[in-house]
Image (spheres, rainbow, N blue to C red):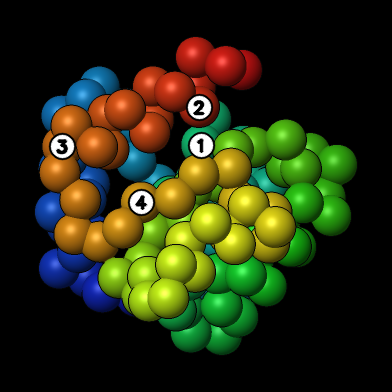
């Protein structure tokens, strides 16, 4: 899970782990790229507005590495103005969650992507 907001990460970690998943935390986009290659997670939840490199740059870097290019990445953001949410697939994301999201929405997104692998 990648987000600059420590409080959101704490809550997100509780939600994701309550669904039975192990969570690896990154606070910026560059750290997410490094940790994705080291950990090879089953899925990445990534904020768009991140320090060092943003979520769009981070997902592009993840897609360029052969070891990580197939890892599903879900964009998480509260910035969903003007119907922009549908554009995230064009940027390399496999799914989208609008913040704040419910446990049910999270579970549907995770299950949908992980079952298709």
Query: Spatial distance from mark 4 to mark 1, Cα to Cα?
Result: 14 Å
Mark 1 burial class by Cα count in 10 Å: few <14, some 14-19, many 20+: some
Query: Spatial distance from mark 1 to mark 3, Cα to Cα?
Result: 16 Å
Q: Which residue is mark 4?
A: 97
Query: Spatial distance from mark 2 to mark 4, Cα to Cα?
Result: 13 Å
Mark 2 vs mark 1: which is more N-terminal?
Answer: 1
Q: Secondary structure at mark 4?
A: strand
Q: Residue lying at the far front in this picture: please name it.
A: 82
Q: Position of residue 41 (x, y in %)?
A: 54, 36
Mark identifier at residue 19: none
Q: Residue visible at 68% across and 61% down?
A: 91
Mark 1 vs mark 3: which is more N-terminal?
Answer: 1
Mark 3 burial class by Cα count in 10 Å: few <14, some 14-19, many 20+: some
Q: Are marks 4 and 3 in contact (CB under 8 Å)?
A: no
Q: Position of residue 78 (x, y in %)?
A: 30, 70
Image quadrant assignment for residue 107: top left
Q: Relative to the observer, which residue lies in front, 63 or 75? A: 75
Mark 4 vs mark 1: which is more N-terminal?
Answer: 1
Q: Which residue is mark 1?
A: 43
Q: Position of residue 106 (x, y in %)?
A: 27, 38
Q: Which residue is mark 2?
A: 113
Q: Residue visible at 31% across and 58% down?
A: 98
Mark nearest the camera among 2 and 1 is 2
- The answer to whether 24 is drawn above or below residue 106 in the figure is below
- The answer to whether 61 is drawn above or below residue 4 in the figure is above
Q: Are marks 2 and 1 in contact (CB under 8 Å)?
A: yes
Mark 2 burial class by Cα count in 10 Å: few <14, some 14-19, many 20+: some
Mark identifier at residue 103: 3
């Amino acid at each position: 899970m990648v987000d600059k907001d420590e409080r959101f990460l704490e809550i997100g970690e509780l939600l994701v782990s309550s669904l039975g998943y192990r969570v690896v935390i990154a606070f910026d986009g560059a750290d997410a790229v490094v940790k994705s290659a080291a950990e090879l997670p089953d899925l990445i939840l990534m904020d768009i507005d991140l320090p060092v490199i943003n979520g769009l740059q981070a997902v592009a870097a993840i897609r360029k590495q052969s070891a990580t290019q197939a890892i599903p990445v879900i964009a998480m953001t509260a910035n969903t103005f003007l119907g922009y949410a549908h554009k995230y697939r064009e940027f390399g994301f496999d799914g989208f969650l609008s913040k704040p999201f419910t446990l049910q929405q999270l579970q549907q997104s995770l299950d949908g992507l992980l079952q298709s692998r």
